[in-house]
Amino acid sequence: MQAIWLQNKKLSYRTDVKIPIPNKNEALVKVLLAGICATDLQLIQGYYSYTGILGHEFVGEIIKADNAPDRIGERVVGEINIACGKCANCLRNYSTHCEKRDVLGIINHNGAFAEYLCLPSKNLIPVPNCISNEAAVFTEPLAAALQIQQQISIHPNDKVLIVGAGKLGQLIAQTLVLTGCDLQVVARYQQQQQLLNNNKIAWLLEQNVEQHSFDIVIEATGFTTGFDLAIQAVRPRGIMVLKSTYQDMSANFSSIVVNEITVVGSRCGSFAPALRLLADKLVDPSVLIANKFPLSQALQAFEYMQQSAVLKVLLQMDNQLYTKP
Ligand SMILES: [Zn+2]
Ligand SMILES: [Zn+2]
């Protein structure tokens, strides 16, 4: 099959990869559409040493499932953490923190930039018919955005700042605006500002951020400069939520102590609420699609993504080129 292979920080397009054989708990999924995310770019840069097929955001169709044959033909999205089910964290129901986890396209398990992938059947969540592939492919990052509300309470009176208006920042903004909080987003680029305008979400430039005035600040830039801005914006005894996995980081942590800031790290979330929001059209991630490439042109897609301010780039498994409406 065709697949995008990462090895020694080099990506290659291969046509000689064997179609995976599912184990007894797994299903074989034909990938329909996949999304490239910042984590993929970080993996190419060596954030985590990984060899294999890249990609973890996808929508696909079950074509083989020995433990659930009635599910063949189902259109699904997939929880990316493959948990052991036996370790202390799994027994606590923290399967995303399984000590022995494999992660689709990230840790020890071939990913979604391929014609087929395998995942445990229990990780595969059916997609309601009313959700298009172009929206369903955002389920994983939307779940990650919603994880913030799973971890901290956000009240209508809270003054909330999102630092970063890229792919994840936009999804976080679309979910947080539903809470009714006083929300502002730091947005650098015109394209990002326009998307926020379309959703009636207030934005500002970084030089206009009022210091030490926000109850909650969410950092989603992927850069340590975003962390510095977030520290300056949060009020004493406020909360900082970190969504970026920084590579090398030096920062002035003393202000966290002096101002008694609560710092919350936030990663993956559950898919069910994300699919509910998509089904009810309460969020519309498809406006974030910048372009779509066939899998055979994935290397060009990655090059295209290096341009600043580019939003979501998708990989389509057949050769139908996307034309943006
Ligand atoms: Zn991702
Ligand atoms: Zn486990």
Image (cartoon, grey):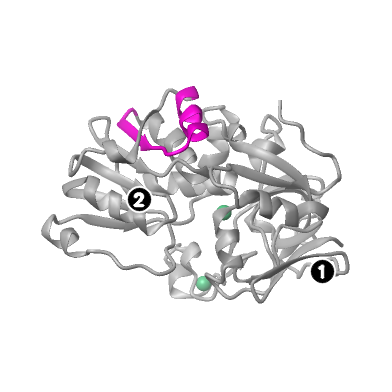
User: Is 235 placed left or right of 178 in the picture?
Assistant: left
Residue at 61% from the left image edge and 66% from the top image edge: 44
Image location of residue 120, percent across then percent down = 68, 62
Q: On the image, which quarter does residue 179 sit in?
A: top left
Residue 119 sits above or below residue 229 on the image: below
Which residue sits at x=58%, y=76%?
A: 49
Cα–Cα span, label 1 and label 2: 37 Å
For this view, does 134 lie left or right of residue 17?
left
Image height of 25 relative to 210, above or below = below
The crowd level at tag 1 (other Cα within 10 Å; few <14, some 14-19, many 20+) is few
Q: Which residue lies furthest to the left in this view?
A: 258
Q: Where is residue 206 in the image (x, y as percent from the top left)?
A: 32, 41
User: Which residue carries the number 1 mark?
Assistant: 21
The N terminus: image quadrant = bottom right
- Residue 50 lies within the magenta run: no
- Per the rendered image, the range of residues in magenta is 180-198
Residue at numbered disc 2: 151
- Residue 176, which numbered label? none
Q: Earlier in the sequence, mark 1 or mark 2?
A: 1
Q: Mark 1: which amino acid?
A: Ile
> Can residue 154 be seen from the camera position used here?
no
Asked which quadrant contains residue 161, the reply is top left
- Is 213 displayed left or right of 75 in the figure? left
Badge 2 amino acid: Gln
Residue 25 visible? The answer is: yes
**Residue located at (18% from left, 40% from top):** 213
Image x and y of residue 3, in percent: 79, 62
Q: How crowded is mark 2: few (under 14 residues within 10 Å), some or many (20 or more)?
A: few
